[in-house]
Amino acid sequence: MAESKYESKICAIQAPIAQVYAVLSNFKNFERVKEFMPKDKIQEIDIEEDIVRIKVDGLGQKIDIRIIDRIHNDTIKFGLDNLPGITANFWIQLKEAAPADTRIKLTLKADIPMMFKLMLDKKIQEGLDQAVMMLTQFPYTQWANI
């Protein structure tokens, strides 16, 4: 096993940090985007406030994404369970650049078997960058006030 750390690019969200944090720190808010998830890759998804159970094509089992820590208006830490042969966690970091300008970055730490690391490095990095871009598209000001 080799511990690897991956960081997304830093992106801007045009919303106050409190609204971004309020949306991202509660998985129930992701019910709104469930229908847009790729059905050819995601077979099942169950969403609760602190945990998402997702069955991804090709894995044959559900992966748990669990919120394990929250630092108000700063960081949301997640644990990943049931990943075959991989131990991992990730976090979302938020920084306020201006009153309605929040910066976001995703970081993933994973223990990956060496035989898979070279195959997965590029895909993991691309996935983080795509995920952070997707997170910039949410209508935070609307969702935080509902």
Image (cartoon, rainbow, N blue to C red):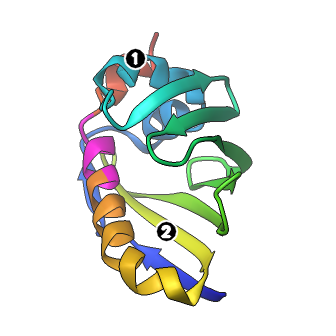
126 left or right, relative to 115: left
Q: At x 46% / y 28%, what residue is drawn?
A: 43
Q: At x 49% / y 68%, what residue is drawn?
A: 107
- Helix, strand, or loop for circle 2? strand
Q: At x 38% / y 39%, what residue is drawn?
A: 16
Local crowd size for mark 1, using a 10 Å CA cut-off: few (<14), some (14–19), many (≥20): few
Residue 100 appears in the picture as rendered: no
Q: At x 70% / y 44%, what residue is drawn?
A: 66
Q: Nearer the viewer, residue 80 or 119?
A: 119
Q: Where is residue 33 shown, x and y percent of the image?
A: 36, 23
The tag earlier along the polypeptide, 1 or 2, is 1
- The type of residue carrying mark 2 is Thr
Q: Which mark is residue 105?
A: none
Q: Where is residue 3 shown, x and y percent of the image?
A: 62, 86
Quarter of the image where one finds residue 50: top right
Image: magenta residue range: 131-137
Q: Are marks 1 and 2 in contact (CB under 8 Å)?
A: no
Residue 113 highlighted magenta (yes or no): no
Q: Where is residue 34 shown, x and y percent of the image?
A: 40, 22
Which residue is tagged 2?
107
Q: Where is residue 32 shown, x and y percent of the image?
A: 40, 17
Which residue is tagged 1?
32
- Relative to 8, is 142 above or below? above
Quarter of the image where one finds residue 54: top right
- Relative to 80, is 44 above or below? above
- The type of residue carrying mark 1 is Arg
Q: What secondary structure do most residues of the magenta stretch adopt?
A: helix
